[in-house]
Image (spheres, rainbow, N blue to C red):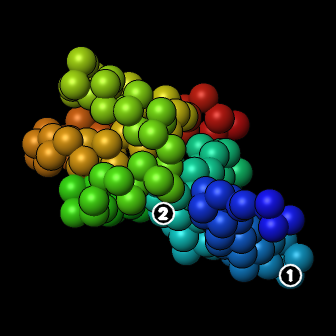
Amino acid sequence: MNGKVAIPKRFYFILFASVVAICLFSFTIGRELYADKTESIFSFGLVHFAGYLFFLLMPVELAFIYYLPYYSGFNLIATAMLTAVAAQCIDYFIGRLLRPNKIIEVMGRKRIEKAEQKIKRFGMLTIFVFNLFPLSSPVIALAAGILHYNFRRFLVVSILGLLLKYVVIYFVFKG
C-alpha cells in the first residue's frame, strides 16, 4: 500500500453536481432573497430546467410551490413545462448518444438497470408515472434514451405526466 486513499469517480461527479446546484440556487433564488426582490420567472425557469437534468436531481416541485404566490398558474405551469420537457429531451438524447458504460459509471449500475427494467416491463406507464410523481423522471428519460425507446411516445407521455402533475400541484397549493 502506498498510503493513498482511492477516491471513486462518483465522488467527483457528486461533488461537481452539488456545486452546480448550490451555485444555481445562490445566483438565482438566493440572490433575490438577499436583495429583497421579487422572485423572477427566469430564476424559476433556470432552477427548474437544471433540476430536470439527470445529473442535478433537485426537488423542483418545491420551487414550483415556492413561486406560486408570485406568478399566475398559467405562467408558472408553462415555464415548468417548457423547462422540464427541454431538460428531459436533453437527458433522452444524452442516453441515446453516449456510451452506456460512461453513463452507468456516473449514475450507478443499479439505478440505470432498475430504470431500464421498468421501461422494458411497463413502457409508457413507467414514463407517465415517473413524470406524474416527484420521482427521478430524469433518470427514466436517460434510460429511455439508452434503450432507444420511441422518442415521440416518450415525449407525449412525459408531457402528459408533467402537465397533470403541475396542474394538481397548482390547485392543491395555490392558496
Say whether marks 1 and 2 touch (CB < 8 Å).
Answer: no
Q: Which residue is mark 1?
A: 35
Residue type at tag 1? Ala
Task: Tell me the CA gap for discs 1 and 2.
Answer: 23 Å
> Residue 127 occupies which quadrant of the picture?
top left
Please determine whether, in this image, residue 143 is positioned above or below residue 95.
above
Please determine whether, in this image, residue 28 is positioned above or below residue 154.
below
Crowding around mark 2 (Cα neighbors within 10 Å: few <14, some 14 to 19, many 20+) is many
Residue at the spot 71% in from the left edge and 70% down from the top edge? 19
Q: Give percent across and percent down for residue 36.
A: 86, 76
Residue 74's label in the rendered image is: none
Which is more toward the observer, 80 or 107? 107
Would you say 41 lies left or right of 93 here? right
- SS at mark 2? helix
Residue 49's label in the rendered image is: 2
Which is more toward the observer, 158 or 120? 120
Please determine whether, in this image, residue 29 is positioned above or below residue 107.
below
Q: Give percent across and percent down for residue 27.
A: 72, 79
- SS at mark 1? loop
